[in-house]
Image (cartoon, rainbow, N blue to C red):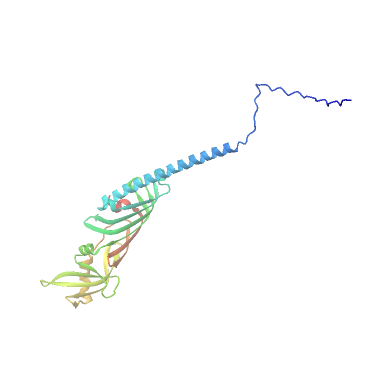
């Protein structure tokens, strides 16, 4: 007997309609990630462009301010340094205000009425600046400044030779030498004193004085009119609300400091 083979049952294959679209559910996260990366790059480019634009306008304005300061104070434009403190700078176009401004002026000549004085190594710090877009109306809420008057300028102002007195170790004193006429004869008067400043009159003062006439000590009763003759012409220029605070003798000249509130820019530049 021949064994029979098992019967195979063939299952018919399903017919696929050619018009049927087969979709596959893929992970969409990489596509979203790309969109986020593109957005970040665009934001970064825009931010960088804004920073560059802000810095460009800041630098241009600082240069213009330095040029105006140099023109007003007889300084070399290339030597004047100006730094505007404002973040962002272009916000000033909307607010008309600046957080602050710093300026360095190696040589500044101030002319007021009949008084002309040249200051050296001037540093100015202004805060809370309003009406920044119009120089004639610009006001600083607070301002401070330092600088010095060299010995040549001091001698010109005082009408006699002024030097730093350090030979006796008396720091902070100056020596003033003037030629005076006594009964038709020219004599040399030498005065040693501590310089200071009278804030209201802006007159330089000389305190704790001692003097000699051709080496002979001068009594105090005769010294007072001599000092008045020196200090009456020793007056510093009016800078509006920026007041002279102190004056101190140093080897390079008289170092001064000024402070003020509601200081007008026009009071400094004379314009």
The N terminus is located in which quarter? top right
Front-lying residue, 254 or 132: 254
13 on left or right of 270: right
Residue drawn at (40%, 44%) of the image: 54
Residue drawn at (47%, 42%) of the image: 44
Front-lying residue, 203 or 161: 161
Report x, y in % for residue 29: 60, 38
Report x, y in % for residue 247: 30, 65
Please tell me in which quadrant of the rendered image residue 133 appears: top left
Q: Residue furthest right?
A: 1
Q: Residue furthest left?
A: 184
46 on left or right of 36: left
Image mark count: 0
Q: Is residue 136 visible?
A: no
71 vs 206: above or below: above
Report x, y in % for residue 143: 36, 56
Front-lying residue, 6 or 51: 6
Please tell me in which quadrant of the rendered image residue 194 appears: bottom left
Q: Is residue 54 visible?
A: yes
Report x, y in % for residue 34: 54, 38
């Amino acid at each position: 007997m021949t064994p029979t083979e098992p019967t195979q049952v063939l299952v018919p294959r399903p017919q696929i309609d050619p018009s049927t679209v087969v979709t596959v559910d893929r992970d969409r996260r990489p596509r979203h990630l790309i969109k986020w990366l593109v957005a970040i790059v665009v934001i970064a480019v825009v931010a960088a462009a804004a920073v560059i634009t802000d810095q460009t306008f800041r630098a241009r304005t600082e240069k213009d301010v330095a040029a105006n300061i140099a023109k007003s104070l007889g300084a070399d434009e290339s030597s004047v340094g100006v730094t505007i403190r404002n973040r962002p700078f272009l916000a000033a176009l909307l607010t008309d205000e600046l957080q602050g401004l710093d300026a360095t002026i190696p040589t500044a000549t101030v002319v007021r009425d009949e008084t002309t004085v040249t200051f050296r190594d001037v540093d100015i710090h202004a805060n809370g600046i309003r009406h920044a877009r119009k120089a004639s109306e610009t006001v600083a809420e607070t301002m401070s400044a330092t600088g010095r008057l060299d010995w040549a300028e001091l001698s010109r102002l005082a009408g006699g030779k002024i030097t730093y007195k350090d030979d006796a170790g008396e720091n902070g004193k100056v020596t003033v030498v003037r030629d005076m006429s006594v009964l038709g004869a020219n004599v040399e008067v030498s005065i040693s004193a501590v310089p200071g400043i009278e804030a209201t009159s802006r007159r330089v003062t000389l305190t704790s004085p001692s003097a000699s006439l051709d080496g002979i000590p001068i009594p105090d009763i005769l010294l007072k009119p001599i000092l008045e003759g020196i200090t009456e012409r020793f007056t510093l220029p009016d800078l509006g609300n920026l007041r002279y605070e102190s004056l101190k003798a140093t080897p390079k000249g008289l170092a001064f400091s000024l402070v003020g509130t509601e200081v007008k820019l026009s009071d400094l530049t004379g314009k």
